[in-house]
Amino acid sequence: MSGSGTVLVERYRLEERLSGPDPLRGSLWRAVDVMAGDCPVALRQLNDLPSQEPFRQRWEVLQTIGSYQLPRFGQLLDLEDGLWAVRDWIEGISLASLQQQRARRQMVFSAGEVLLLMRQVLPVLGALHSDDLVHGHMSLQNLWRRTSDGLPVVLNGELVPAEDAAGWMDVRDLAVSAVALLTGQPSNPPSSLERLGLDPAYQAVLERLLTEDPNRRFPDAASALEALQQLAMPEQTGPIEKPIAASGRFTAMAPSSTSPRQKRAMAREQGAEGRLWPVVIALALSALVGSAIGWFLLSRKSTADRIPRSSRDGATAAVSPPREELDQREQLFSRLRALQVDRGWFLNLVDASQLSRFPALGGSIPSESLGDAPLRRVWTELAEEWLARIGQLPPATRARLGRLRAGDWEQPRQRLQQQGVHPKVVEHLVSAGAQDLLAGAMQGRKPAEPFRQLWIAAAMQSLDDVEIERLKARPLEPTNTSLGIPAGGARLVLVEAPADDAVLLGINGTPLMQMMVFGANGTVEEERGPLRVARIDAVAGLPLQVLVTNEGISSGVFTLSCRADRPRPPLPDVDPDPLPDSATGELVRPPGLDPSAQ
């Protein structure tokens, strides 16, 4: 029987059993992928034979769903002790735990925060329902806030076929969880929502979400999402103090009555959540539109528009845009604030990106006229793409975008150079690390401002994380190693060899990996291209610097083999016209050309 420390298929090492064993759902394990640098993964072990085949069929469907708010579903392993399913490990906190944290501080989720949560989760449910799957267990325990971006992630569903359950049940369970967050109480909706003090339109939609009446309930996630999109966003979209009961009605304390102690509690609440709640506030559904996560799967059309200069500066536009466009602008501004990104620099970034894509604009920014609406939509789509990239950076780095200087990455650069890495190789290493931040046309080179800010940010991040592997190539017998490389990452291998020896390299990995080989003085000995076999002459100098990058979306492993190739000794010169010996008549060579004389 498998237990902690067991390594499955020489790759997945079991660390801790998180749940189970359950007769039907099996066991959930936390594990690490030893072939990907101990990257954490989640494994579900299913022992019940009758359940394995239906589970296998549902898993194969999940592997095709591209929602960013579901974990990626990996391979299935048929082993002696059951069927094992591999999926991404999600770093974060469940909303149930977050609710408990807030309860200890006498705080709850606000109406605006809950409205955004439902808008973000319903597209995920719609993705499942469109593939004839029902989650079957929507609860605060299975809704997690991801640490990296604050988005809600849906976990641990029963994933029953749609013929065995109805999608509206998932919608209702989500609404029950929403009410629990509003009240700070367990997932049992109150007998009357009037006690929550919600806007009447908000309350009406929530009541429809909770009802089981087939004549009133929403038939699917798409219709529920459409209704929620029509609601005005409440003024408060962050955590609030727990309402107090007044005349049978929950009433939030007025801001003027907030004591210094309560203000400090709110500050501690923000700190306890890692300052992630503003990200949840600002990650509006329009962000999911640009990523084709929700709206595409629900067959909805994106209506995102760009932000004209007049609205950026707070001025009133001569032509008032539609309300939906104004809401989207505010959502974008909120997201900028939540990510702590300098607004002026970011707007210049998106402007420069659009102008480079459409040079025919001649440097002009689209206005708010009806004719420029398509260009405004393009602008917003670009803004969403850049925000998604910028969100990968640490908060401290994001806050400095627009003010970064070349010297900010000087310390890690000097550290690498002291270890024998040439400056040109360092720049290529940074460019490899920047591939997830910069658009394709700007990868592989140091771009101009405002894009250079992201290049420097990538340098600060990638050089701090870089691991250098050192190998010694020997004659006759090859030296081999296997190294993990994260998605979008790079590894650097320094290869030494005896003086005057050439080096034979053989590198194998996935088709999405690329390699470059540099000489000791930074010259490119092997151009960037697929992993392959190469022979590097001794004139390249030592150490050879081998850079391997992974352009895939998942971690991988590559193997590198190296062997020193000693130069062959020169053949002796042969006299083409030997002289006959005067005594014997035999042909002889002058002493300097006689091999036996050497």
Image: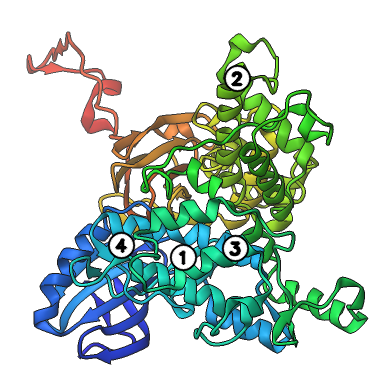
Q: Are marks 2 and 1 in contact (CB under 8 Å)?
A: no
**Which label lies toward us, 3 or 1?**
3
Name the disc covering residue 356, or none. 2
Which residue is disc 4 drawn over? 73
Q: How far apart, in angstroms, are the residues tagged by discs 3 and 1? A: 24 Å
Say what amino acid the circle numbered 2 marks. Ser
Nearer to me, 505 or 474: 505
Tag shown at residue 153:
1
What residue is drawn where x is 64% and y is 34%?
A: 322
Residue 521 visible at all: no
Q: Earlier in the sequence, mark 4 or mark 3?
A: 4
Q: Few, some or many C-alpha atoms within 10 Å of disc 4 (few <14, some 14-19, many ≥20)?
A: some
What coloring was used for the rendering? rainbow
Q: Residue at x 55, y 84 (%)?
A: 190
What is the C-alpha distance between the residues marked 2 and 1?
35 Å
Q: Is residue 312 above or below residue 465?
A: above
